Amino acid sequence: MIITKQKALPEDFLWGASTSAYQVEGANLSHGKGPSIQDIKKVPEGTSELDVCADFYHHYKEDIALMGEMGFKTFRFSIAWSRILPEGAGAVNQEGIDFYSNVIDECLKQGIEPLVTMFHFDLPAALEKKGGWSRRESVDEFVNFAKILYENYGDRVKYWLTINEQNMLTLVGEMIGTCNLEGVANKYKKLYQENHHMLLAQAKAMKLCHDMLPNAKIGPAPNISLVYPASCKPKDILAAQNFNAIRNWMYLDMAVFGKYNNLVWKFLEEHDALPDIEEGDMEIMAAAHPDFIGFNYYSTATVEWDNGEVREAVFENQQSGGSEPGVFRNFANPNLPHTEFGWEIDPDGFRATMREIYSRYHLPMIVTENGLGAYDKLTEDGKIHDSYRIEYLRRHIEQIKLAVSEGVEMMGYCPWSAIDLISTHEGMVKRYGFIYVNRDEFDLKDMARYRKDSFYWYKKVIETNGADLSD
C-alpha cells in the first residue's frame, strides 16, 4: 500500500511540547521540596547538577507565554512527587501545591491545555531509602499522590499521564539513575517485581481518575519503538518478536488489557523472575482502562538472534537492545543516519510504530516525546539556526499525517522539548528545545530566553494545523 495523499489532521489536534520537572525546574531542594532519586544520584562526569536546570520554577510565566506565542494547544509537564510530598507520603508541601496550580492557571490563561505526567523518573528519595518500588506499599503511596493531584488540579486538568517510560525504568534504570542493582542476586526478579507494583499502581490511579474526575482522560506514557529483525532469517524474526514483547508490548498489553504478555511471562519463568502477585491484583488491572495511549518515540531498535554466547549487555541509548543470551542481541542498523549524539534517525519507523500500536490497541494516541538533541549555538545577534531540528521534526510530522491517512487515531504531538533543559545523559550541552536558555554546562550566564529558528517554524506548523511544513 502506498499513501500519496495526506489527510488533514483533526481540527482539535493537540500541538504542544514536553518537559519533565527534574530536568527543567531547578529549585530542586528549596521551596519545601524534598530530594528525589535524581537529586541524590551521581550525575555523569562533566555534566551539571540539577539544582538550577532551566530555572523554570522562577521563569514559568515567561516560558509559558512563549509557548502561547507559538500557539501551543497543550503543554506536557510533570509534577515532582517530592515537591508535593517531600517525604513521598505524609505532610503536604503547600508551596508545591501552589506552584503547580499557578503553572496550570498560566497555561489556561494562554489557551493551553495542561497535560500532566504524574511520575517522570523522580521517586522521592525518602521512599527509595525504604526500598522504593520493590515494596508493596509503593502502590498505595503512588495512588495517594495521584489522589492529591486529582483533588487539587482535577477541576482544571483534563488530560493525565501516569508513569513516564515505565519500560525504560525496567530495562535501563541504572543508566537513567533510577535504580541500583549492585549486590542484587537476581536483577530480573527485582526489576520485574518493581514493574508489577508500578503496573498495579497505574491501574489503580487510572480507576481513581475515572471515579473522581469523570470528564478527565488518562493514559500511560511508555517509550515505544518498533523492533526490526536484522535480516529475513527466521531466527532474527523470532528475536525481534522477543524484544518487541519485552521492550514494548508487555507494558501496553497490561495497561490496555490487564494481561501479562505471554512471551515476557515465559522469559520471566526461565529467569526465575516471576513477580509475586497477590490475590485481586490481576482483577484490578483488568478492570482499569486507559482513554488514550501516550508514547515517546526517538528511533527504532534492530536485533538479531542470539546464539547463547555470553556477551555483556550494552545499552548505547534508550532504543538499543543490548543482549539477552538465547533471546536477542542488539544489531547496528546500517540503513539509518545518526544524530550528533549517535541516536538513529528513523521517521519511517515512527509511522511503522504508530501503525503497530494502533493495530494492537485501537486507542487514540498522543506523541509525548520525539525530538533531536544537538549542540545549538547562540550567534552574536541572538539567533539560533537549528535547521537540522526543523528537518527532523518535519519528517516525523509528515509520518503522523500519513498514519492519520491510514486510519490511525492521532490526537496530538508533543516533541521533546519545549525549552532547553538538562539531558539525563549529556547535561545542558545537548539541547532539544524550541526556546534557547542562555547558560552553559556550569556557567549560568543570564538564563535569558531566545527564540530558535525552529520556534518560528513550529508556530507556523501549528497555525496551519500541520498543512505547511516548509521552512
Image (spheres, helix red, strand yellow):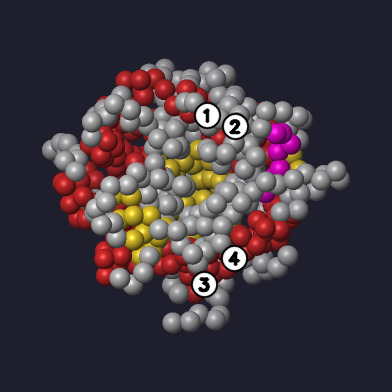
From the viewer's perspective, is 56 left or right of 324?
right
Of the image marks 1 and 4, the number of the one nearer the N terminus: 1
Marks 1 and 3: in contact by CB < 8 Å?
Answer: no
Q: Name the residue under label 3.
A: 402
Alpha carbon of mark 4 to alpha carbon of mark 3: how far? 11 Å
Decide which of 208, 360 is in the foreground and name it. Answer: 360
Type of amino acid at the residue the image marks with label 4: Arg
Decide which of 180, 325 is in the foreground and name it. Answer: 325
Q: Is residue 103 magenta?
A: no
Q: Mark 1 points at which residue?
A: 43
Type of amino acid at the residue the image marks with label 2: Thr
From the viewer's perspective, is 172 left or right of 398?
left
Farthest residue to the front: give it: 309
Q: Mark 4 points at which residue?
A: 395
Q: Does the magenta stretch include residue 436?
A: yes
Q: Residue at x 37, y 32 (%)?
A: 179
Of the image marks 3 and 2, the number of the one nearer the N terminus: 2
Type of amino acid at the residue the image marks with label 3: Leu
Marks 3 and 4: in contact by CB < 8 Å?
Answer: no
Of the image marks 2 and 4, the number of the one nearer the N terminus: 2
Depth check, mark 1 against mark 4: the one in front is 1
Q: What stretch is highlighted in magenta?
A: 434-440
Depth check, mark 2 against mark 4: the one in front is 2
Element under label 1? loop
Query: Is 21 situated above or below 368?
Result: above
Local crowd size for mark 1, using a 10 Å CA cut-off: few (<14), some (14–19), many (≥20): some
Q: In which quarter of the image is the C terminus?
A: bottom right
